[in-house]
Image (spheres, helix red, strand yellow):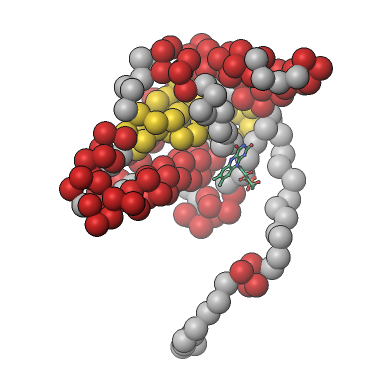
Amino acid sequence: MGRTFLEAVAKRRSYYKLGESVTIDDNSVVELVDSMLATLPSPFNVQSARIVILFGEEHRALWDIVIEELRDIVPADKFEATHRRINEAFRSGRGTLLFYEDTSTLEMLKRNYPLYADKVDAWSEQCSGMHQFAIWTALEDMGYGASLQHYNPLIDESVAKRWSINDKWQLIAEMPFGEAKDVPSSRSQTSPPRDRMRVYGLYNK
Ligand SMILES: Cc1cc2nc3c(=O)[nH]c(=O)nc-3n(C[C@H](O)[C@H](O)[C@H](O)COP(=O)(O)O)c2cc1C
């Protein structure tokens, strides 16, 4: 740690080769998630984010589930490559965070604020995205590499069964993390960032 917020944001990348070395004490990851759940914003402060943290064997069990679910849908001649990639990019890491949203909380929000009911599902995704981004950035700042994955809804049922997940929790994303063993290529831009912003009323002191 020790970077400024802007430096940490600039440093965050997707890593697709993870190692299992425990370079950060597991408890520090738990404390990070604890502090993020306590502080990150949510619509009407409803705090709908739920996060499951899997380390070691439990983390590997998750990626075994992904592999087994993919076995049923990936063409046989492609499966070996898929299997290898999941092993090397995700399963080989130290842990995985599962980002959920508690739909019972969201339903309550819709009932309490009918005027905004049609906005709540989008806000829930945005709220989860804020949690994903903040934690992803903080993990990198602490010394781990991570990436963002979406094997939901394919894995939802098996995961819920394995870890007795509340049936009102909806899985939004998976974030494997661990020792960063690849070096991401330099960032590309689809167009200059200046072309993607509009500025009005600028005042130069
Ligand atoms: C909403 C969202 C969904 C994403 N989903 C995936 C995904 O399913 N699998 C994946 O490998 N990367 C996923 N990514 C990561 C992006 O591909 C990645 O952030 C982007 O290419 C920029 O690379 P960087 O993370 O190294 O800066 C996602 C990113 C965002 C913001």
Residue closest to the far right? 77
Left/right of residue 72 with respect to residue 116 in the rendered view: right
Q: Nearer the viewer, residue 179 or 168?
A: 168
How many marks the image carries: the answer is: 0
Q: Is residue 3 above or below residue 31?
A: below
Tell me where residue 51 appears, x and y as whole percent: 38, 30
Left/right of residue 195 with respect to residue 35 in the rendered view: right
Q: Residue at x 43, y 12 (%)?
A: 162
Q: Residue at x 65, y 36 (%)?
A: 15
Quadrant of the image where one finds ligand 1? top right
Residue closest to the far left? 112
Q: Is residue 114 visible?
A: yes
Left/right of residue 111 with respect to residue 77 in the rendered view: left
Q: Nearer the viewer, residue 197 or 96?
A: 197
Tell me where residue 169 appears, x and y as whole percent: 35, 29
Q: Is residue 43 above or below residue 66?
A: below
Q: Nearer the viewer, residue 109 or 20?
A: 109
Q: Nearer the viewer, residue 183 or 16?
A: 16
Q: Is residue 181 above or below residue 191?
A: above
Tell me where residue 85 appears, x and y as whole percent: 71, 24
Q: Residue at x 52, y 21 (%)?
A: 155
Q: Residue at x 46, y 41 (%)?
A: 132
Q: Is residue 117 above or below residue 38?
A: below
Q: Is residue 24 visible?
A: no
For residue 75, what is the image quadrant?
Answer: top right
